[in-house]
Image (cartoon, rainbow, N blue to C red):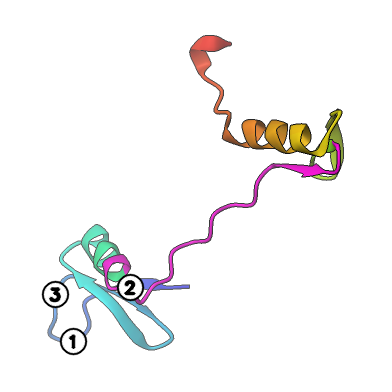
Amino acid sequence: MPSVVPGLGDTSGYVVFSAMKVLGRGATIDAAVKAALDSELVEPAPPPAPRFRADRNEVSQRGEVVATCKSNTFASRVANALNVYQPNERSM
C-alpha cells in the first residue's frame, strides 16, 4: 500500500513511496498521487467483482437466488443487465 509523506531532505512538496521505492513526487498530495499513477509503477485497481452472477438458469447475488430463467442465455443477459443498472433518484 503506497504512502504519502512530506518532502524528504531538501526537497519540498510530497513524495509517494512503497517498499522503499519512490513512486512519484509533487507540490501537493494530489499532484504526488497523480504522478505516481502516471508513472505506471502503481498497478491500477482491478475491476470489482460483479454483484449478480448467472449459474445455469439461475441469477444469484451473494449466493442467494434472485431470479430463475428458462435458459442459460437468458440468465446471463439478466445478470449482465442487473450489473449495469444504476438506479436514479428521480425515478424512485
First in sequence, mark 1 or 2: give its number. 1
Residue placed under numbered mark 3 in the picture? 12
Q: Secondary structure at mark 2?
A: loop
Given residues 80 and 20, the one toward you in this image is 80
Q: Quadrant of residue 16?
A: bottom left
**Separation of marks 1 and 2 at Cα, in angstroms:** 25 Å
Residue placed under numbered mark 2 in the picture? 40
* Tag 2: amino acid: Glu
- Stretch of the chain drawn in magenta: 37-57
Residue placed under numbered mark 1 in the picture? 9
Image position, residue 17 (x, y; %): 35, 79
Q: Is residue 40 magenta?
A: yes
Q: Is residue 75 left or right of residue 26?
A: right
Is there any visible trace of residue 14 in the rendered image? no
* Tag 3: amino acid: Ser
Q: Quadrant of the C terminus?
A: top right
Q: Vertically, is 79 above or below 15?
A: above
Magenta span main SS: loop
**Separation of marks 2 and 3 at Cα, in angstroms:** 23 Å
Image position, residue 37 (x, y; %): 32, 66
Q: Secondary structure at mark 1?
A: loop
**Separation of marks 3 and 1 at Cα, in angstroms:** 8 Å
